[in-house]
Image (spheres, helix red, strand yellow):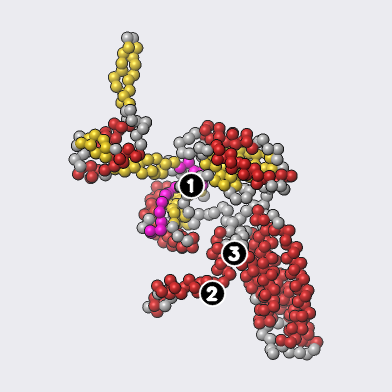
Amino acid sequence: KFYNKSLGAEKFKSDVKPVLEKALGGALRLFTEHVFEGSFYADPGKTILHVRGRMPEGCTIRQLNEAVRKMEQYISQFDEVKLFETKIRGYRNSSITVQFTDEAEQSSFPFLLKSKVESKAISLGGMDWSVYGVGKGFSNALNMDYKNSHILLTGYNYGQLFKYAEQLEAKLLKNPRVEKTEITSSQSWRSNTRYEYNLQVDKNLLASMGLRYSDYTNSLFTQLKSYKLKDFYNQTESQPVVLVSSEGTEYNKWDFYNMPVETRKGQKKLSQAGEINKRLTGKSIFKKNQVYQAYLNYNFIGPRALSKMVQEREIEALNQILPLGYKAQKPDSYYYWNRKEKKQYYLLFLIVVIIYFITSILFESLLKPLAVISLIPISFIGVFLTFYLFDFNFDQGGFASFILLSGLVVNAAIYIINDFNNLVKRQNKSLTIRTYLKAFNQKIVAITLTILSTVLGLIPFIWGGQTEVFWFAFAVGAMGGLIFSMVAIIVFLPVFLNLKK
């Protein structure tokens, strides 16, 4: 009752909670919600332009090959192109990877070629093209089938697995924020999944109209079907005769819903008792690690955090009722870096432990090292704000900047505290603010120059922009953290030492 009247009250959730989250959440909240959740891993390497193309459904691989050959001929005319490799795996899956000469790679030619390839793709038309790898990605695909949320189900029985997926689909559709669900065997765009038009007829409604199912289908097939008649004999030759509807090639979905047809009960619209839906067909069967897999793909209308919460809630609820051998989970995203691995966090913890023991021996105290270590998370605020304010991608280089900061910030604090301890011992003074200021003034110039020289030394790593994997994130993270560490050293260090007046 107390919770429902206080933290659980609607007024608190709508008016007070949003303000408190922004005021008390701090830089870490901004970083985790807006940067870390969208961070991805990238491999360093040479500049490569990727060109992908796929034909609409129902086309052939021969048609795709003709279009790709035109693109190849266009790319091959540029001397700056070192080589390109083309792969065609199906009529909806082709790729061209373009590599450049060393001289062209250091120039603006990759961006120029990307622009020219985009124009060529638009002029070819008739298929979906995407061009990426240099600058901002390009695509002329509508991506009408794209789904922004996915749940992976695995199990040893293929039929039963899809029944569980259908149960989850029905449950999700009760949520007004969920729409356009589909069950597939793979997330990959290489999947051979196709669509077909499915006619659904309401037999009860037909009966109320005084019609049978055969009456309905005969009225429809009259518009489409061809009939083989008795052969015609022309002297000594037999000629086959086929009766074809003159509207067979012209009858379409609009006619089905709007044009009346003749029935034994008079003219009726076929749409009065039926409807046509586009449905998936020809689902591929995927098996990984001896278990079948099914993806429930759906669109979630709302913020990413809410989508994630609903996804996790449904996965947890389904896993509680699934039998042994079946499991629901989040799909792995290959482009996200290994942020879930605990090894990297253990490394940061190990660094803190090592620093604590070393400074404990140096200061001959168990409390003063805590003042040194407390500066590490404060300096991390600079990293969080840098990536959030400038919308940089946080990759493995950003994590490396945390490790660098842990050493540099501690190094500055050790200089000041060690000099402070020496002054206290030599002059038999107490731990006063005056003594601390004397030690601070003796070391702050050297500390400032060290931080400034380190920041300036990292500038060359940001010249290449965000296309520089690891080094760009490492440089901007370290620079932001080092600049903010000055605030930690000047403001917070004397507070943690508990000095006397």
Q: Quarter-wise, where is residue 236 in the image? A: top left
Q: Mark number for residue 388?
A: 3
Q: Residue at x 53, y 32 (%)?
A: 62
In depth, the one of 388 and 278 nearer the eye is 388
Q: For the residue labelled by badge 1, is the local secondary structure a helix, a strand or a loop? A: loop
Give how far across and how far down residue 345 sits, in percent: 61, 66
What amino acid is found at the position of numbered circle 1 in the picture?
A: Asn
Q: Say if the magenta span includes residue 191.
A: yes
1 and 2 marks in contact (CB < 8 Å): no
Q: For the residue labelled by badge 2, is the local secondary structure a helix, a strand or a loop? A: helix
Q: Earlier in the sequence, mark 3 or mark 2?
A: 2
* Disc 2: CA contacts within 10 A as few (<14), some (14-19) or many (>=20): few
459 to 437, vertically: above or below:
above
Q: Which residue carries the number 2 mark?
A: 24
What amino acid is found at the position of numbered circle 3 in the picture?
A: Tyr
Q: Quadrant of the C terminus?
A: bottom right
Residue 213 visible in image: no
Q: Mark number for residue 164?
A: none
Main SS, magenta region, reads: loop
Q: CA distance from mark 1 to mark 2?
A: 40 Å
Q: Residue 407 vs residue 217: left or right?
A: right
320 to 112, vertically: above or below:
below
Give how far across and how far down residue 226 sits, in percent: 32, 27
Give how far across and how far down residue 482 sits, in percent: 69, 69
Q: Mark number for residue 143?
A: 1
Residue 84 visible in image: yes
* Disc 3: CA contacts within 10 A as few (<14), some (14-19) or many (>=20): many
In depth, the one of 288 and 200 nearer the eye is 200
Over which residues does the magenta segment extend? 175-193
What amino acid is found at the position of numbered circle 2 in the picture?
A: Leu
